[in-house]
Image: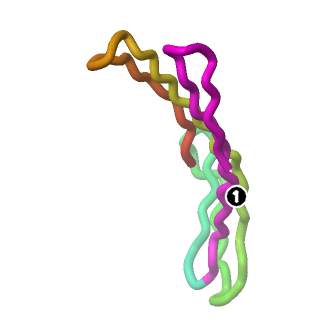
Amino acid sequence: MNDDFKATEKLTLNYGVRLAAFSILGGDTFNTYENGILTQSRYLEKGKFGKTYVNLEPRITANYRINEGSSIKGGYSRNT
């Protein structure tokens, strides 16, 4: 989902968000780390689900038009 917003004649913003999700699938060993240290290790049976991760991924870009041929652009995104 995203949207464009014309703040002024020269400044345009584009912003949005995406929902990302994935799950650990079995058939291998699943390790859990805390501060880079292994805290737990367990085997997941094939076809079984381990932990599911769900995250929002926001993003925004700005475009400032200096003149007909030049503009300054910047952006931010958080990806998982």
Residue lying at 32% horizontally and 17% vertically, measured from the top left: 68
Task: Say above or below: 33 vs 14.
Answer: below
Most foreground residue, 6 or 78: 6
Task: Say above or below: 10 vs 44.
Answer: above
Residue lying at 59% horizontally and 36% vertically, measured from the top left: 59
Residue 57 image-quadrant placement: top right
Give the dominant element type of the magenta stretch: helix, strand or loop. strand
Most foreground residue, 21 or 36: 21
Q: Is mark 1 on a helix, strand or loop?
A: strand
Residue lying at 65% horizontally and 40% vertically, measured from the top left: 3
Most foreground residue, 25 or 16: 16
Residue lying at 54% horizontally and 15% vertically, measured from the top left: 9
- Taking the image as shown, residue 8 lies to the left or right of residue 75, namely right
Task: Say above or below: 27 vs 75.
Answer: below
- Taking the image as shown, residue 42 lies to the left or right of residue 27, namely right
- What residue sits right under mark 1 in the picture? 53
- Taking the image as shown, residue 79 lies to the left or right of residue 69, namely right
Query: Is 8 part of what is drawn in magenta?
Result: yes
Which residue appears farthest toward the left when viewing the image?
69
Percent position (x, y) of residue 79?
55, 44
Magenta residues, as a range?
1-26
